[in-house]
Amino acid sequence: MLVLLFATGPARAFDWQVDVTPAGELFPALQLSQSPRPRADGVGDGDGLVSVRVRGDDLPRRLKLRIDTPGLLRPVELETRIGAGQRAIDLHPRLEWDTTWLRSLDATRSQPMRLALEADGATQTRRVDVRVHALDDAPYFVREGRDRVDLGWAFAGYVDPNDPVVDEILADARASDAGFERGSDLHRVGAVWAALERRGLRYDAGDPALSRGPVVWSQRVRLPAAVWRDRRANCIDSSVLIAAVLERLGMRALIVLVPGHACVGYRTGAGAQYFETTLLGAVRGRDGGRAATNFAAARAAGHARWQRVAARLDGRHGPDYALIDIGTARAYGIIPIGAGERASRPSPEATPAPAGSSRQRGLP
């Protein structure tokens, strides 16, 4: 957490403190995957990643906060009145990101954030240096001092069942499999797998890790359009893409995180099925039989993987092990980043709900 304290002149005995968390880093993906919602612990509908705390025995009766930094659609403004005798207030502004600008970033960018706090007509301006991360940079764990923050739900933000790529995958699966609509869940997942194989999607063994602590753990998650265009995906890229298709089909999608790896699955009445996406494109060619062979091998490898790690999927072995239930994440208010992009436009598409962790105990 970045903390800056500023004292005003003698007319008013109060301080104001700027918090940018984690550790002065801004991850727009965290904000875009959460719906705007009023906060019970202060003023504003921001996510708390940027906040201003005002404390003192003689607070001004009126405050107006303005924040600007490159990449915003417009400067943020937040205004409030303070009751007589009140000695503290927290301001939680919501940053409205220009997602076109964010998509142009291919690396973390250091830049100034400028804040202006107007108190009873007198304005103070300050500058805070922050680091803005690209849209595909997903933080999943934070350790600050004694605090441990599980952000595994962030991956659910990249699972977008309404992405145009999902439409293309399902159109291919339905066109190539006459029994798709009436088939079992496993049958339909197999048809989706075959559609990915026909596209020529192959496993990319590159390491997606961007940071492995000591404060922030994060990794790159390529967005569906890039995966579809380049026909390559590492384990987390393919896991979130397949999870998006499963969610679109009404299935309870799951993503398993283990050290340096991820796989995808879905909940069934008897437990769960898991699949190793490293086997995508393992056998070249468009033959449906080969795709079916790959799918069967991926299912067997996914089950074997789960058996090896299930005991650690208990929520106590972060940041290395986690089972992310996409449905649970949605219940906590985590929305697809694509929906978050739409929510940042002039006519927001909001679904207020409290955010929280989506990590669950392992399923059989």
Image: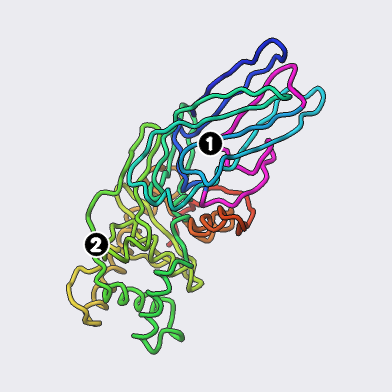
Seen at 75% across and 17% down, the residue is 58
x, y (%) of residue 83? 80, 28
Magenta span includes 142: no
Q: Nearer the viewer, mark 2 or mark 1?
A: 1
Q: Is residue 195 left or right of residue 126?
A: left
Q: Is residue 284 above or below residue 135?
A: below
Q: For the residue carrying disc 2, how many other residues have a C-alpha within 10 Å: few (<14), some (14-19), or many (20+)? A: some
Question: Which residue is most to the top?
Answer: 10
x, y (%) of residue 177? 36, 86
Which of disc 1 and disc 2 is earlier in sequence? 1
Span highlighted in magenta in the image: 32-61
Instruction: Tell me the kind of residue under disc 2.
Output: Tyr
Residue position marked by numbered label 1 in the rendering: 68
Question: Which residue is most to the left?
Answer: 284
Residue position marked by numbered label 2 in the rendering: 203
Seen at 42% across and 49% down, the residue is 101
Q: Is residue 194 above or below residue 343?
A: below
